[in-house]
Amino acid sequence: MKELLEKVKSKLRPDLKVLKEIDKAIEKINYLLKKEKVNAVCVRGGSTAKGTFLKNDYDVDLFVRFQKTENNISDLLESVLKKEFNVERVHGSRDYFQIKGDLLFEIVPVKKILDYREAENVTDMSPLHVDYVKKHVSKELADEIRLAKQFCKSAKVYGAESYIKGFSGHILDLLIIYHGSFEKFVKAAVNWKPKVIFDLEKHLKDPLKELDDAKIHSPLIIVDPVQPNRNAAAAMSKEKFDMFIERCKTFLLHPSEEFFKIKALSKDKVSKQVLPDEELFFFEVEPLKGKKDIVGAKIMKTYEYLRSHIKKNEFEIVKTGWEFSQKNKNFSGVHKGSNFMNKDKGSLYFILVKEELPSTMILSGPPIKQTEGVAHFKEKHKDIFEENGRLFAREKRKYRLAKDLIKDLLKDKYVTARVKKIIIC
């Protein structure tokens, strides 16, 4: 195990030369702030500030820290950045900005605070989170965090966005600080049961009683070390929690480098799982433009819509899945006049039992004792029969072949309103 993890660590360590490029951008922004007489300072944020970023796999977060008394800081920052850069304003709880070049910079305006109670916006807390991690993470522990990130990315459980609901970078920072190494973390995780609780600074005597009910729905409770009224893992779903535990169990039984390789969803790979009596429907999606979280959620809703209608029409799903990858790579410069390419895409697939369904389908109705429900059911359906105290109806089936259903679903307004393009591969 030790030899394997050391090998993976060496592959995940980034080229620190990139920090020089980041610092040049910071220097430029600070020059502009000073020139425009704006009382604010630009600093590194996120994983590049913590020293936990992965080789060739990161965006660059920068914080511009304003005094607490300053107002309209998003507008003020935009006016400064526009002097030199092509910026894209991204709407959020507080608007921030993207500069797309050889690196993708996300520049976030925050109020300079020393305590969570001073925060006007959730983003104001971000520098405090960075400071906490920097204080507790050595170079050796940074390697362990990189292992955890890569492991979770490979397992498709990385990210706190609403369409993922998995392990954020912040969660993994805290869990590795708590356990002391990736190996100890994984060995502990196989015994997790909802609700597992971590309180690194021992802020609360009983987190389940002291935190708001809305913050403890998740199976993982992490009392934020710099904001004790917050569960850092509140957005995590039971699905991703369970997926992670199973992945840890498999890894410990058969540890290999494969558990750290990120494999994109592809038709070729999925096709190998299809049996002779099954059929594959694989889709590629071109997303709409917009904030990653919102765009990803729209692809997720498209997937769920297709899945629900496939089930509703009684086609048997053997296996299914989806993913959304946002790749801001191969940009050509960050200054005015630069051009860039987005290579964002979603992939969905359904493996169905290959069959032609009967020409009629049976719809279940209400129990005959429910007078109002029975009357409504009889109004809606003609060919009705009773069985075991319940009404049923025979209806002509609209779709006997899955391909006919899917062809129509892709034209549905619900789908076309949520993605720019979706095609069957």
Image: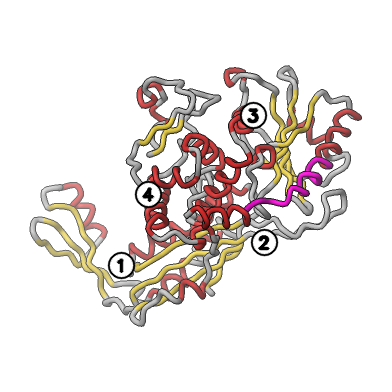
Nearest to the observer: residue 285 or residue 60:
60
In the orientation shown, which residue stands out farthest toward the left? 388
Q: Nearer the viewer, mark 3 or mark 4?
A: 3
Q: Are the residues flagged by discs 3 and 4 in contact, CB closer than 8 Å? A: no
Compared to residue 347, the image places residue 396 above or below, namely below
The chief SS type of the magenta part is helix
**Residue range corresponding to the magenta coloring:** 12-24
Q: Earlier in the sequence, mark 1 or mark 3?
A: 3
What residue sits right under mark 3 in the picture?
131
Residue 20 highlighted magenta (yes or no): yes
Q: Which mark is residue 343?
A: 2
- Element under label 2? loop
Q: Which mark is residue 266?
A: none
Q: Nearer the viewer, mark 1 or mark 3?
A: 3
Name the residue located 47 percent from the left edge and 61 percent from the top edge.
256
Distance between the alpha carbons at the discs numbered 4 and 2? 31 Å
